[in-house]
Amino acid sequence: MIKAGIVGATGYTGSELLRLLALHPDVEVSVVTSRSEAGKAVADRFPHLRAYNDLNFTDPSVDTLAQCDVVFFATPHGVAQAMMPEFIDSGLKVIDLSADFRLKNADLWASWYNQPHGCPELIEQAVYGLPEVNREAIKAASLIACPGCYPTAIQLGFLPLLENKLVDTGRLIADAKSGASGAGRGANVGTLLAECADSFKAYGASGHRHSPEIRQGLNSFSGEDVALTFVPHLLPMIRGIEATLYAELTTELSLENIQAIYEKRYENEPFVDVMPLGSHPETRSVKGSNYCRIALHKQADSNTIIVLSVIDNLVKGASGQAVQNMNLMFGLEEHAGINQVPLMP
Amino acid sequence: MIKAGIVGATGYTGSELLRLLALHPDVEVSVVTSRSEAGKAVADRFPHLRAYNDLNFTDPSVDTLAQCDVVFFATPHGVAQAMMPEFIDSGLKVIDLSADFRLKNADLWASWYNQPHGCPELIEQAVYGLPEVNREAIKAASLIACPGCYPTAIQLGFLPLLENKLVDTGRLIADAKSGASGAGRGANVGTLLAECADSFKAYGASGHRHSPEIRQGLNSFSGEDVALTFVPHLLPMIRGIEATLYAELTTELSLENIQAIYEKRYENEPFVDVMPLGSHPETRSVKGSNYCRIALHKQADSNTIIVLSVIDNLVKGASGQAVQNMNLMFGLEEHAGINQVPLMP
Amino acid sequence: MIKAGIVGATGYTGSELLRLLALHPDVEVSVVTSRSEAGKAVADRFPHLRAYNDLNFTDPSVDTLAQCDVVFFATPHGVAQAMMPEFIDSGLKVIDLSADFRLKNADLWASWYNQPHGCPELIEQAVYGLPEVNREAIKAASLIACPGCYPTAIQLGFLPLLENKLVDTGRLIADAKSGASGAGRGANVGTLLAECADSFKAYGASGHRHSPEIRQGLNSFSGEDVALTFVPHLLPMIRGIEATLYAELTTELSLENIQAIYEKRYENEPFVDVMPLGSHPETRSVKGSNYCRIALHKQADSNTIIVLSVIDNLVKGASGQAVQNMNLMFGLEEHAGINQVPLMP
Amino acid sequence: MIKAGIVGATGYTGSELLRLLALHPDVEVSVVTSRSEAGKAVADRFPHLRAYNDLNFTDPSVDTLAQCDVVFFATPHGVAQAMMPEFIDSGLKVIDLSADFRLKNADLWASWYNQPHGCPELIEQAVYGLPEVNREAIKAASLIACPGCYPTAIQLGFLPLLENKLVDTGRLIADAKSGASGAGRGANVGTLLAECADSFKAYGASGHRHSPEIRQGLNSFSGEDVALTFVPHLLPMIRGIEATLYAELTTELSLENIQAIYEKRYENEPFVDVMPLGSHPETRSVKGSNYCRIALHKQADSNTIIVLSVIDNLVKGASGQAVQNMNLMFGLEEHAGINQVPLMP
């Protein structure tokens, strides 16, 4: 059994890792750290894990974690950067779910996170963990920068358009909506049920931290600098991201042809589902699962292609994708532990 | 007291009219019709109206309704067209909340509603009831075509940009989201709580009936044919519409200048609130009220202006706007009966 | 115009007072205090109040507040006790929405709130602000202890049974459920949307602070010490309390007779609605309004009477009831400012 | 592989069976029937099952279904009664999730369902599928009457109290709350999101069809006729039942002793979790899983024991329990296919 450690397991991505790994056939979680909860039983904090987890939280320590084969960081930004050199030196494989190693440009990172990058020397080595793009590199990696939730839904939606140079990259629009679990498990007035249930709003409309990560990916797909307008919104629900993407077609290809390109691009991808023309993917159709579902639309007399893309922000947008990366790194079945039927209704 | 009749009062726009008119100082509801509920007490069907309404539903009849000063149609499309000639002939003022008289082109109407227009001779006479655009015409009108919910939020959001020719009209995008009450009160699997709570999706992405109404309005503001991509989405909540609008600026004006144009355009509008730069209007900030709140954004290194517009789909998007129209038609205070503080939380 | 001050207006009961008083015909809010928000505009913190409130929050000071005619405390427990003597000495009328003066026994208060009572000398003078029981005393009072939300729903539900000695007081059961706004607006992990939406649970099942207040009331109605089991639950919604009450009948009276007793008891109460037999009151039927709706049931071959009682926890359970008390204290129309039709849907 | 058929698979219990059986190691679903959807692909109706199910719905026919090893009825009441004799004659094992064979008294059934029982001759043979009570009988059964959702939560909660004669059976109270999926997937105004979200109410308070089933179970546990008041409520959420149970203790045993009795009673039960004293089980802690979690409480100076019991109404309250029964009937691992970690948040 592969031994896994989880740093910062009291948040949603940490608990979701615990849920997915609980039944993973090849992995056992052996260390779960939390400064604030050290000494307490995981199952007391997370009653849904009763019968599945008998560990106690411990303080994060390199020595303890070094006994693992793989360590997941489910921490706020900045934490992984500080501990990473020791971990990498000790030969551990590390999968970082935070934003710490996603951007290839340390200065850009610093400008969005208002602090210097704490470990620029490992940025180059970090592999961006989007299997649909970097599967081979992931297999060989020691350090994975797991993509953000919005970036996953948006990149997978735009990918075939950009790789095939089908659209004007000068004005891409991503109107994205996320459930409240995306804001994390911190005590916060803005995400109280009484504040955000039965309501809806945009946020970060003048600029959001996920923008540079998304643009970095889109640039690499298209081979040029794209212009992207990205507006996130807060949904009155728990899990799920929907991204509605707009781009101007520069091709004569019909929608059916573009549909075929999408189907071809993703035909061997176990977790990307290109739905039939006319479909409108619901976030609940991926709830609790690692799927990304995509559908294409075009309106009469219009040159604008519309891509609808949905994921579960905590699974394909975080912990499920992290497990998918781990499976690739260790040569396991890619769907091991994440072969879960979405929960409907 | 002005006597009001409501045709088809068992749906949400009908019951919302009853709520708003219950405390209107100058109006009393004297006839409430419903074929399916004729003979039953309104307050039995709508317990929230106990103590505010002691009427029974009656069958719709021109004779009974002709005793009113004003009649509201809160019916599915097609119903108002059939009854309208008699009503207009009898000198009644009519406010139609359905889609029957919104489009000026009867053939266009027929193509979107899959049936011939039942009363094309009255289309020209019908005034489109958006007070921010047609206030004077509304005051003199006998027949008001009350705007749809999406069209209200989107038109008010785009209006100053188009009137002032600040944007490229060749690629307008409206990504709009509505609460489930927008789908009406009919028994329908798709809007069951267990089907659409805790989930989110786009619908009608290849073309939606509200598109021609919106385009008709945007065309009139800009004086030319606009190209609009409109994608509606279903929110897991009851009331509220948010529209996030995207347009390419063709002006050198700064965001602050554009903000000033918006503030100027709406400074005398009692129900349009241009929020300060940096704001993100929430749908709950207008819940139960007749307000439309608007905020502007622009991202770094981008030429795309982002307009955020929120309304309560049942008030400014339907019944509140209908009352606003009635107030104008009868020379009452424009905010009479609709001066309601939004319900928060 | 009566001048009102609100101490601690950043929470839900405070903002609800602002909503209700904004359109009160005889009252203007002239002072709004908040230590944390002093200097900021009320309408910036509460965008739904834009156009209805142009005040800034100020630091709470007796001098400033003493210029008011009435002061509302919308503060956590303990705050009102500390400031109360000075306020009462200066001749102000005070309405305290917190728990500070509800219990007549200072020791009992101290044992449930884990601190000594800070102002025992004013307890006797404080009038418990349940108009259906204490209307005349309220009219003459200087200091009102406004009832809690659960206590309001439960007391109004049990009142006619106990006053008329129709049930065994040795085993009363109140199974009560509250929306999340009842937990207040503080940052708290437990009431995050992602924690309590789409879920339901009991809490405080071994004993809850509202128990002694409820028992104190029930004792006074029945003239003897009742035994009450009270279990609160957290609903995945914003506003509303439903209490399902169970008691063993000790009378031969039929359900119809008991219904008649309820109707008689409340026939002159403007805000208590005894619904027809067979009804099941919904919390939404009172949303945003000051009503309490009550319905009675009894099952075949059973001696247990079931009382269903619903209120809006922020209105009849807090701020609406506070305004009702104020109206009585100042000789205004009892429904002034709180004659609001519930918001449905 | 065991071949399973599902009759009436377009509702929630049917689709939940499809979800659970999709990954069952020993079972494959080979026939899925629906009169209304015959000929259509299951995955078109249920996009969450894309990649997990390539069947088409077929018309229900005994011949087709007779090729299965086990048939599940996920139908409205009455359907299973009509088809059952042929199925049993042909040697099939049948698990009926409807109410058709739960009551041992055909007349009682007829009086609650307003129609004669269609197959009284098989009632005696039917085994009530509550494994915690009838495990051995289930193993040998051909026909299982799978318990209802409320009855499961309530019976498991009361069971140790009644078996051990610890309470007065003359006044048991079950205040139960269910998510909207419990009302099924039929088009119905009352369970529209806009009707039941952000609201809460009791229903069936004068008598509900699940009462006789619950009483039948409680009678058998206690060996005498119990008196039960059962009030169901509708929660504004999708999945989950919580039952708060009240009973008068007739024993001197301490709460700790009673806790020990519960722990002992359920120590070998794979799907019943007696939580530590002081716990308040949340419905989300069992979401998507087959667990029932139970906690006990008692308030100061009170003789009333409070039992909190939660299940997922579609899993332990329906389809998961059906699979548990099937596993027992076929000698499989009892948790096969239903060893799912609850989905949190």
Image (tube, coloured by chain):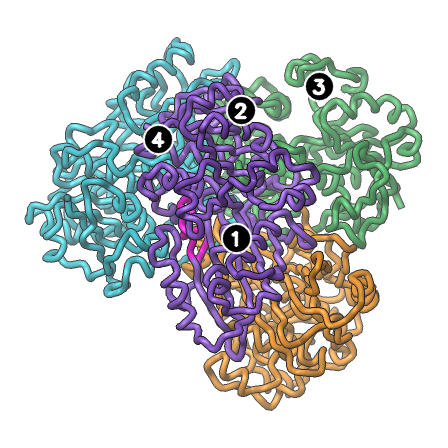
Chain colours: A cyan, B green, C orange, D purple
Q: Nearer the viewer, mark 2 or mark 4?
A: 4
Which residue is drawn at the image coordinates 38% and 27% (left, top)?
D3
What is the distance, in whole Å, between disc 4 and disc 1 at their CAs? 37 Å
Magenta residues?
A: D281-293
Q: Position of residue B130 (x, y in %)?
A: 69, 33
Distance of label 2 from label 1 (alpha carbons): 34 Å
| Mark 3 vs mark 1, CA separation in Å | 45 Å
Q: Amino acid at mark 4?
A: Val
Q: Are marks 2 and 4 on the same chain?
A: yes
| Picture disc at residue D34 | 2
**Residue D119 visible (yes or no):** yes
Q: Which mark is residue C236?
A: 1
Of badges 3 and 1, nearer the viewer stands 1
- Per the image, label 4 sits on a secondary structure element best described as strand
Q: Residue at x 33, y 36 (%)?
A: A340
- Which secondary structure lies at badge 2? loop
